[in-house]
Amino acid sequence: MSLLDKAKVLSDKIAEKTVEFSSDEVIAETIIKAVDKQEKVNAILKVRGSNYRVSSLNLSMGIPPGVSFGIRRVKEDRENEEGEALDKPPVK
């Protein structure tokens, strides 16, 4: 098999995989798995007392597909919704 024939076979395989990755079922399954991972990681972070949570997901359907997670800091237990410390009187 010549080098050009090997390149053609490889290019056909990549084209097939690209079609597979664009399938609605594959995309839905990827989202379900990523969200499940987010929830499990957030539960572990909460149990360990971390002030950080996975807050967003970015999925890229390419070759290879990718998932990236965004992290955010949650409010301290000693802060109210406005971010003021609970042991201080509110500023008027």
Image: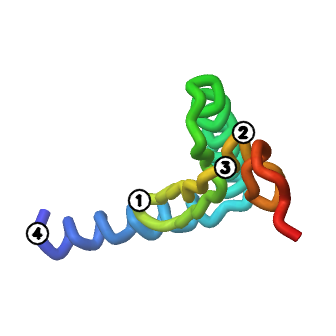
Task: Name the image quarter holding the C terminus.
Answer: bottom right
Give the residue at x 77% y 50%: 88
Which circle's residue, 4 or 3, is located before the other in the chain?
4
Residue at the far top: name it.
47
Which circle's residue, 1 or 2, is located before the other in the chain?
1
Tell me the element at label 2: loop
Which circle's residue, 1 or 3, is located before the other in the chain?
1
Tell me the element at label 3: loop
In terms of image quadrants, where is residue 71?
bottom right
Question: Dot 3, crowdedness within 10 Å: few (<14), some or many (≥20)?
Answer: few
Type of residue at label 1? Pro
Residue 55 appears in the rendering: yes
Check residue 2 in the rendering and tell me which mark sits there, or answer none: 4
In terms of image quadrants, where is residue 40?
top right
Circle 1/circle 2 CB separation < 8 Å: no
Tell me the distance, in whole angstroms, between the alpha carbons under discs 1 and 2.
40 Å
Query: Eyeballing the image, is 65 above or below 2?
Result: above
The residue pinned by badge 2 equals 77
Tell me the distance, in whole angstroms, between the alpha carbons under discs 4 and 2.
66 Å
Tell me the distance, in whole angstroms, between the alpha carbons under discs 1 and 3.
32 Å
Check residue 74 in the rendering and tell me which mark sits there, or answer none: 3
4 vs 3, front mark: 3
